[in-house]
Amino acid sequence: YEESDIRAEAVSDTEKPTLVVRNPLTNLESLEFKAGDDLALNDIDVQVKEIINSDDNTIHIVVNDDAALPSSETRINIKRSNGRLRNPSSISVAFNLARLHETAGRIVPAVELHKAIVKCHPSYVNSYLRLACIARDCGSLKDCSEWLKSAVAVAPGNPEVLTLVGNLHLSLCDWAPAQKVFDQLLTQKVPKVEAYSMLSLGNIYFNNLNTPKKYSKHLQYAADFYRRILTKDNANAYAANGLGTVLAEKGELFKAKEIFNRVREVSGDTILDTLLNLGHIYLAQKKHPEALQMYQSYMNRTRTTGAPITSKSQDDDEAEVLLYIAFAYFDWARQTELFNNANAAPADERYQKCIEYIEMAMKKSKKENVILRYNWCMAKLQAANCVLQKVNRNIRRTAQEVKDALDGLEQSLPIIQTMLQWKAEGRKVTIPTGMLTDFANQCKHNIDSAKSHLNEELKKEKEAQVIRDFQRIEAEANEKQRLLSAALEKERQQQEQEERERKARQKMKQVSNLVANWESAAAAEKERTATKKEKGPGVVPPGGVDDEAGIFDTDVVPTSTAALFDESDDDDDVNEPSGKADETAKVDAEKELFGDSSSEEEDENTNKRRNDEEDEEERASKKLRSSDEKDHEE
């Protein structure tokens, strides 16, 4: 847009939206725009329809009827076309630039550039086709149709124009006009368009197999078109995929599966219809996990690319695939119920997944779909039957499950009754009246049954709760008793540990006393020996023998001396050999120090024996001192 010095304001007392220019210096010759040009008023785009020079030296500018004009005076910006487009050699460059804008996601500049091209060169068909494709991708089928009409008017027999026209009819499910267009293309025998025309005709016949009394005929026509394509080009994966659908429709599942796998291998999963077809094959073979995997792969890829494969919008296409997934779960649940025992437990969960996917499909579908509503009610009915049959199949259930089943039945019944009312009013409902009536009767019967089952489960849960309360109280009492016993045992062990420590301290004290006595005895012995050495040897008597030294030998071991002067009345101790006495003393000492403290009587005997030994040593020491004193006196 180019800014101008012209200012205008809206006029409210006219039938059509009108701008008025009140500057007396402005006249028709000084205006920089004309009728048909585009203007901008504060980001509001308008188109000039008529320019009127008024008698009061004002200029009235009539614009398009749907323009929302500003109330205040506004500067007029004039939309200028690129002058370079007038040069025929620059059209291709401008078209390629517009395609780059499309590829980069800049739709508005691409549309503006294409419009500028067709404005300067009305016979340039490619821009019409691109404008139609952009409108189709944006969901504006009306604009797409208008641009295609303009393209047909410019180039009536152009194969690309006719192909887009036929695709537009296919997207609207207008089979007869689409067939007419592709028949016209087929008569032109254009090599690049002929195969596409035959493929489209085969798809048209295959999508109309439900036509009364023409099932076999349409199926044969579809197969013939696919085979004609493969005869001329055996590498055409789309025709092979179509032939696989025909074989699957005839029940030749193994052959169809081989074809679809081959198409996936050759195309690298670029033909997403193959995933759906393989999903249908697996579902027909009761291989539900594989079927679900194919459907999920299809949805993930269409969400990534954003391009639907079926002849519907993106949301409608996704809703249809969600319905396929829901039916796969529904059929899997019914197959699981055939066990009619505890192995049928997963059926309830699969019914819930079916209901979940149907609800997702209902949200994706833009219009009220009676079939989806009926399928949702049917899934609720079968899920409720599955819950009610759990008792006969020895499967645990809760009162909440029964209540959810009852709620589902109570929600389904009014929907079915509404459909029956629509039938009575003559409205179009594709479900037979007999099916709706049977459904309503069965739903009412199951509601009554579910209520009685719910009362039963509530009673069972109440009784189970009482039992659980008793068990909880008993468990708490047992736990308290266990804690009390553990505390008593810990206290007993602590007391025993204290008693052992007390006895150990007592023994250590005894050991210390014994060591002290030994040290005292050793010191006394050392002192006595030193005294005798200081005294020196006596005069040797005649005969060469010192009688005193022979009798009172100072080198006698204290223990032997104690034995010589032992005044004990125990004859056994006197007559006991020396080695045995020493061994007994050693054993007694070991028992005294490391004996078993568990017997109080043994401890008392040990203490008594030790006291006796101490008395004996004391008497021996007294006798020894007495002997020393006598020697000294002599």
Image (cartoon, grey):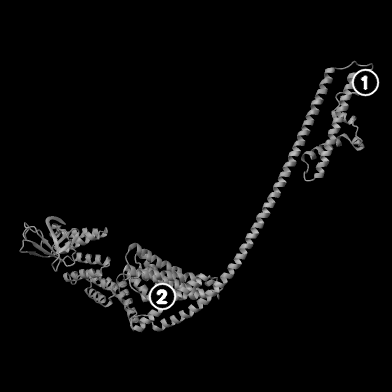
183 vs 596: above or below? below
- Amino acid identity at mark 1: Asp
Task: Residue 265: give x, y in percent of width and height.
Answer: 38, 65
Q: Is residue 163 above or below residue 530?
A: below
Q: Quadrant of residue 218?
A: bottom left
Image location of residue 119, percent across then percent down:
15, 64
Q: Residues within 10 Å of mark 2 (few under 14, many from 20)?
A: some
Is 162 left, or right, of 244 in this rendering? left
- The residue sitting at 57% across, 70% down in the picture is 462
In the rendered image, the quadrant that contains the C terminus is top right
Coordinates of residue 48 in the picture (x, y in percent): 13, 64
In the picture of the structure, the residue carrying the numbered disc 1 is 547
Does 216 sit above or below residue 628?
below
Viewer-closest of 403 and 369: 403
Residue in front for this viewpoint, 184 or 326:
326
**Which residue is at the front of the view, 50 or 582?**
50
In the picture, the disc for residue 375 is 2
Circle 1 packing at 10 Å, graded few (<14), some (14-19), many (20+), is few
Task: Name the residue located 75 percent from the left edge and 36 percent from the top edge.
Answer: 509
Label 2 to label 1: alpha-carbon separation: 136 Å
Evaluate whether residue 339 shows in this view. Answer: no
